[in-house]
Amino acid sequence: MNQNNKALSALILFGVLTFSGCTLPQMIKKAKDQKLTTVPDPLEVHGNKVNFDMTALLPVKMLKKKTTYTGAVGYKYGDQKVDVGSIEFKAENYPNAKKEQPKIDKSFSFDYKDGMEQRGNLILVGTAAKGSKSKVTPEYPFTRGLITTSRLVKDIYLVSYGDHGYNNQPEFVPVNVNFYFSQGNADLRASETSSKRGKFLDAFIAHKNVTKTVTITGSHSPEGTETKNTKLAGHRSASIEKFYKGQMKRFDYKAKSDSIEFVQKAIVLDWTMLKDSLATYKDLTQEQKDQVLGIVDGGDSFYDKAAKISKLPFYGKLFTHVYPKLRAAQTEILTLKEKKPDAEIAVLGKKIAEGKDSLGALNEQELLYSASLTPDLKEKQAIYEAAVKKSDSWQAHNNVAAIQLDMARKATDKAQMATMVDAAISHLQMANNKKETAEAYSNLAVAYTMKGLAKEASEALTKAAGLNGGQDVARSIKAQQGIASIRSGNYAEAINSLSAAGQDATVLYNKGLAQVLSKQYDAALATLNESATADATQGWTYYVAAIAAARAKNESALTTNLQKATQADASLKAKALTDLEFDSYLNSEAFKNSIK
């Protein structure tokens, strides 16, 4: 190569290097004019995720031939940084970059971590590259902060009690007494009135039990004069009514007798009682019984059927042992059930719990019911523990656990709270060993939530939802499902669940929060007002109402609720000053006055 060619080659190489060397610094310089935006802005956390859509616009003439511009996106808060992802502009994909701004739209997501509620920023660090050469931009901050309103959800600890099964209201129960008559006769025999049945009825009437109705049903056997005298059954019921009223007069019922309704019935030409008696009679074979039933279920008249039965070789057994029971008057007395007064049950329940009376002083239902008659949680616990000793039932174990969870919820000492929750879990496991119930599993979900065991709580709640329970446990399940739905970011489902969870203040608070997150601001304000009415001491209720008002651009409602929030909880003043929900109101005098 001659000297001229060598000089030319060197000049070309120098030019290339010089051009390359100028290109990257020029790109880095122009990068400061890039436009970075996100939706939403500020960022928001939902369901433990921060999702956003980002648009990046580069200046015209920034991308040079055969160059690439890559932007590494991160979220920086305090002294921490989370890598979020990247965008990449290749010059070959933007042939009109000299006249049009290169643009990228991309979706990003990153996990929320504790501490991110501090003010932070998305940042982008760009890298301009050509071949093996590259240069890096400084950090470009954009999209300031992170709204964490969805994290304001409150756990709900609604415990469920097993039904005590006791009814303290007036209750009428049937008392049954049967009287039997001679064949073809409707006169009440002395042997019947002096029998145990007669003496029982005599004593019952003498006691003057509160009685609503006396229903007397006369019947007859299917033979001879019994069958032909169709009025016989009615006469038998009339005979018992006459005797009953005579005894009432004897024992001086006076005006009380007017309140008792007597009802006479007669069963005539009917085979039902014979069939029922035949089923329990043991001195006939099944084949013999089938013979009788074959006749009874046939198409003949009642009289012809009775005649056919009388010709069976074993008819004597029927006539001697079965038919006499059909010549009867069945007497059902609907009388007021005797019950201990609530005051007596309450005293006995307390004595049993204290060991001052025997476990037999109350039955199981009365003992469980007695716990509901005292407001003192320790007394309730002692009564339920006595019920465990008495019956070892699932209700007793479940209710001991429910009390322990209620007490744990109010405990200020964490170690004491953990001990009570662990004890509750043991009782609930025993309850489910006795019988799996919605109440016990729902309470287990509450207990595991208190311990921070989310997986176990979710599994217990799923079991509870699959079992039938009373109204209270259904509400508890719905409340817990609503909380889970808020945490997963499913706000519509949360609102549906919490709407069926009752009117507890915390239930209403969470429902209002879900409505805020669903952008139903008017509905949220109404629900949060209900919550505040139920419990006006909860500053967070007013705080979330202030957020709803801020989003609805209702400054009057914002400041009113924020003032109530900070009056109930002074720590919310600092929270409000850094909360991006109120960012556009920071310079407002009304806002400043509301948090003084």
Image: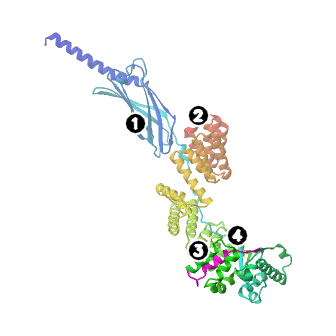
Considering only order in the chain, which callout, 4 or 3, is on the residue closer to the N terminus?
A: 4
Magenta range: 265-286
What residue is shown with label 2? 584
User: Which numbered disc, 2 or 3, marks the residue closer to the eye?
Assistant: 3
User: Which numbered disc, 2 or 1, marks the residue closer to the eye?
Assistant: 1
| Residue at the outermost left position | 1
Label 4: how many residues lie within 10 Å, few (<14), some (14-19) or many (20+)?
few
Q: Are marks 3 and 4 in contact (CB under 8 Å)?
A: no
The amino acid type, in three-letter code, at marker 1 is Gly
The percent coordinates of residue 474 (x first, y second) are 59, 57
Which of the two residues, 569 or 305, is positioned nearer the viewer here? 305
Considering only order in the chain, which callout, 1 or 4, is on the residue closer to the N terminus?
A: 1
User: Which numbered disc, 2 or 4, marks the residue closer to the eye?
Assistant: 4
Q: CA distance from mark 3 to mark 1?
A: 62 Å
> Does the rendering let one see residue 49?
yes
Colour scheme in use: rainbow
Element type at mark 4:
loop
What residue is shown with label 1? 85
Label 3: how many residues lie within 10 Å, few (<14), some (14-19) or many (20+)?
many
